[in-house]
Image: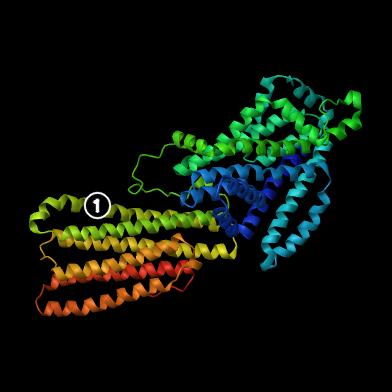
Amino acid sequence: MSIWVIFTLLGSLALLMYGMKSMSEALQKMAGPQLRHVLGAMTTNRFTGMLTGTLVTASVQSSTATTVMTVSFVNAGLLTLAQAISVIMGANIGTTLTAWIMSAGMSFNIGDLAYPAFLVGIILIYQKKHRYIGDFLFGLAFLIFALATLRATGTEMKLGENPAVLSFFASFDPNSFLTTLLFLLLGGILTFCVQSSAAVMAITMILCSSGALPIYQGIALVMGENIGTTVTSNLAALSANTQARRAALAHMFFNVFGVIWILFVFRPFIDMVCGWVGYDVNMTKELAGEHAFLANAAKLSFVLAAFHTTFNVANTFILIWFIPQIERFVCWVIKPKKVDEEEDFRLHFITAGFMKTPELSVLEAQKEIQSFASRMQRMFGMVRELLTLSSSTTDKKDNQAGDFNKLFTRIEKYEGISDNMELEIAKYLDSVSDAHLSDDTKAKIRAMLREISELESIGDACYNMARTISRKYNGKQDHFIDKQYDHLHQMMELTDQSLTEMNRLLGGRKDLYDINRSFNIENEINNYRNQLKSQNINDINNHNYTYAVGTIYMDIINECEKLGDYVVNVVEARMGQRQKSL
């Protein structure tokens, strides 16, 4: 076997992996938002969830993409963990379509179809309207070309006639249970190392179709590949939140359980699948002749694809009735972290291990921004509570000083959290924007960068108010009069309403949101600020309170008005409107 044949084999596998990735990303660009809506709407029970997972995965050719979308919906509260498990079961069935595509490529010479696909693809790529279809055709052409090259290379290598290869596989006892376990482990390790179940499946099909690898060991490799993919996703989920790790564990449980029960009926189950495909497991080259033997061996790629599908369908049929029990098991194994997540800066939805495609990464970032906005409203709630504590009489002030300082320290911590969240989300979006994106996604990223900048400004405004209140509380200035406290609470109530509207928009669909709600509240805030500004001058002139107290009072009022402007800027960014000038 020459070195160039080995390079051709490895290069074809690389091209196969790239073609699969390109196809998946192009399909997600074409139908990403619609797929997300389907995933959220069609999971009313375990059966529709399973069917949805199957259809979505078959559409985007990526069980990982479906799993990532599912986990993000669990995080957002749009799906329960039980619904997510049913979708993941369906994703395991949907991903078997890849094996059928590959088996067709290994059995028939489809290489000539690659060149028309390349030609049409490059024409469409340069047409802005259809460039995603062009990306898909290019990925498909790479996939077809890779399969054709692998088929030709496998034939050229003549593995079925290579004494070294044949003696190597003959050294394993085909009837030994230990041999099955060994190849199962080998399949898992290979999948984990190359990070592609498609590549391992292609290698297995080449070995089996050439007659070098017996079908029983080949199917053991396929079973190991099923477990190898879940090991990768579980390692990626280690840095994720609790629900993501539970979903990844449920995925592993599904495949490990399936492998365990199939081992008890291993040979009868494989013989049944071989019978469906028309493959004779007992045929030998010596008795049937080389031509008949190779013709029989050519069916092995279809046997592998049929086994992959039958295995996942049977496993789903068994486990779909026990989803509540699986949910309890993964919740028992993975306990929530015993930290106050509000006080601990950590991105909840964005994780490095789950950033698979730009289109899905945008969804993760949107959920993180929604969490960021909710945090800022909680921070503003603390400022309101701080103002209430600062209004205590002198007798109560000494008793509440500890509570006041503790709350002010929390607000300081939240201000640091807001700075860190802006930087981390911006860094993530920057890494996403390096990829080839749709115009819609580019616009979303620009809008999200603007949103996080304005949200960080909201955090700054809250901190400025808290510092002003603290300075007043710890200084020698007179107290605000009751009328001032009433006005401050009323202004803060309007500001809180604007934050509530902002969070309603960020947590829902913008086409269902009336932007005039936010504009009306902002106008109320502006008008009230102007009214209080005029009244403040009159009150100082009438000696109702000192100029120093009036200055501090108006500082808080003006900061509320600025915060309202930042809120409107977030709303306009989300709705895709021009920025309001401050």
Residue at (60% x, 62% y) in the render: 438
Residue at (19% x, 78% y) in the render: 535
Residue 336 relative to residue 561: left or right: right
Give how far across and how far down residue 9 sits, in percent: 75, 40
* Residue 69 position (above or below residue 248): below
In this view of the protein, can residue 520 be seen by the observer?
yes
In this figure, which residue is indicated by the disc labeled 1?
A: 409
Give how far across and how far down residue 1 sits, in percent: 80, 32
* Residue 398 position (above or below residue 328): below
* Residue 462 position (above or below residue 578): above
Give how far across and how far down residue 109 sits, in percent: 84, 46
In this view of the protein, can residue 582 be seen by the observer?
no
Using the image as rendered, state which of residue 137 and residue 249 is in the foreground. 249
* Residue 90 position (above or below residue 181): below
Using the image as rendered, state which of residue 99 and residue 426 is in the foreground. 99
Residue at (30% x, 76% y) in the render: 526
